[in-house]
Amino acid sequence: MESDAADGTDARSGATDGADPSLVDRWTALDRGWQALALGLGIVAAHLVGQAL
């Protein structure tokens, strides 16, 4: 959770676009999770190729 240092309030509480901030946070976390999964699988695949050679 991000906080505004000036007034100590939650930076997401002032959202005026109508989107649920928790939904945006979940999407961002999911996106990073998928990126991490793809990176991990790529590293494992490269290791297996290296072991096969």
Image (cartoon, rainbow, N blue to C red):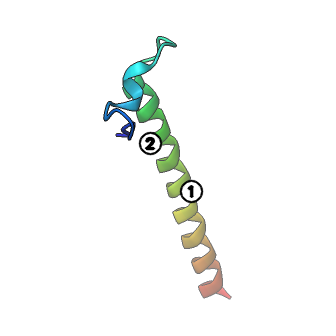
Q: Quadrant of residue 12?
A: top left
Identify the disc placed on residue 38.
1
- Please state which amino acid type lies under the numbered disc 1: Ala
Residue bearing mark 2: 29
10 Å crowding of disc 1: few (<14), some (14-19), many (20+): few
Q: Do the residues bearing badges 1 and 2 touch, measured as CB atoms within 8 Å? A: no
Q: Which mark is residue 18?
A: none
Q: Position of residue 4 (x, y in %)?
A: 39, 36
Q: Which mark is nearer the camera, 1 or 2?
A: 2
Front residue of this view, candidates 21 and 4? 4
* Dot 1 or dot 2, earlier in sequence: 2
> Quick one: quadrant of the C terminus?
bottom right
Q: Position of residue 28 (x, y in %)?
A: 49, 38
For numbered disc 1, what is the local secondary structure?
helix
Q: Amino acid at mark 2?
A: Ala
Place of residue 27 in the rendered image (x, y in percent of width and height, measured from the top left)? 47, 33
Quarter holding the N terminus is top left
Is residue 13 placed above or below 35 in the rendered structure? above
Which residue is rendered at x = 46% and y = 41% of the image? 30
Task: Say which residue appears at 39% left-offset and 37% top-offset.
Answer: 6
Measured in 3D between alpha carbons, the distance from the residue under mark 1 to the one under mark 2, in whole angstroms, is: 14 Å
Q: Residues within 10 Å of mark 2 (few under 14, many from 20)?
A: few
Instruction: Identify the residue shown where x is 64% and y is 84%.
Output: 50
Q: Is residue 34 left or right of residue 8?
A: right
* Residue 53 to residue 45: above or below: below
- The answer to whether residue 11 is above or below residue 39 is above
Q: Secondary structure at mark 2?
A: helix
Between 10 and 48, the one nearer to me in the picture: 10
Q: Is residue 32 left or right of residue 49?
A: left
Query: Which residue occupies the foreground of this view, 5 or 35?
Result: 5
